[in-house]
Image (cartoon, rainbow, N blue to C red):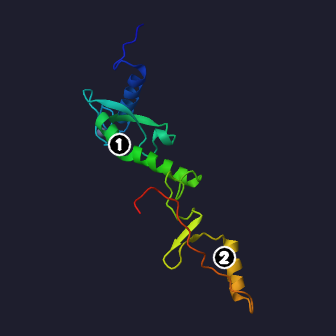
Amino acid sequence: MARKYLFGSKQREDLWLREKHNAQLSGRGDLPICNLCDLPVRKTDAWDESHDPGRAKAFGGKRTAIAHRLCNHLHGAQVVTPAIAKSNKVRRRDIGAAGPGLGRHPMPGGRRSRLSKSFSHGVVPRLTLSEKLAVMRAKRAIGGDIPEFDAPPVALPDTGGAS
Ligand SMILES: [Zn+2]
């Protein structure tokens, strides 16, 4: 016997019938319930297969239901897409792919620069921690030489800006 699909695809028909059955079981009527706005989805409404709002498909969610097309698109634009962007940003920072000084134009004298800028000393080569410790120990040593901390100013590479 030929099967007549209600909405042109077997998956959508099965989804509609499953959600209709769930609505009937919960005493909500004969129409599927939108899983985003909790209102019935009429046969004339534009509807989509919607993933569980608590766990989007992009985060591995597999539970689906019916939602109005407008509800689904609003939820995607306002909740899911920003969450994906944030998780991508956090992951990039976490694995060290992004961060201060790792962009295309790191700030001159920034924390990853080999130069250090200060108000009192100007632009000086950045000392490593062991070099700073050596300077401090030499300053504290009795009768020792006091090393010159103030290195001569270093010219920054020309960035093409106005001088
Ligand atoms: Zn809705």
Q: Mark 1 falls on what kind of element?
A: helix
Please give the name of the residue rendered at 50% of the width and 47% of the height, measured from the top-left corner. 88
Classify 2 as above or below 120. Answer: above
Q: Are marks 2 and 1 in contact (CB under 8 Å)?
A: no
The yes-or-no answer for disc 2 within 8 Å of ligand 1 is no
Which amino acid type corresponds to the residue marked 2 in the rendered image? Lys
Confirm whether residue 101 shows in the render: yes
Residue 36, horizontal then vertical, whole percent = 34, 42
Residue 90, horizontal then vertical, whole percent = 51, 53
| Quadrant in which the N terminus appears | top left
Disc 2 or disc 1, which is closer to the eye? 2
Please give the name of the residue rendered at 31% of the width and 38% of the height, measured from the top-left corner. 28
Q: Which residue is mark 2?
A: 132
Which of the marked residues, 2 or 1, is nearer the chain's N terminus?
Answer: 1
Q: Which residue lies most toward the front here?
A: 163
Classify 111 as above or below 62. Answer: below
Task: Please give left or right for residue 153 compared with residue 29 in the image.
Answer: right
Q: Which residue is mark 1?
A: 77
Q: Mark 2 falls on what kind of element?
A: helix
Residue 96, horizontal then vertical, whole percent = 59, 53
- How far apart are the two marked residues, 2 and 1, measured between alpha carbons? 50 Å
Task: Please give left or right for residue 107 compared with residue 72 in the image.
Answer: right
Please give the name of the residue rendered at 43% of the width and 35% of the height, measured from the top-left corner. 64
| Quadrant in which the C terminus appears | bottom left
Q: How many marks?
A: 2
Classify 44 as above or below 133. Answer: above
Q: Which residue lies most toward the top here?
A: 1
Q: Residues within 10 Å of mark 1 (few under 14, many from 20)?
A: few
Ligand 1 found in image quarter = top left
Task: Please give left or right for residue 147 compared with residue 80 in the image.
Answer: right
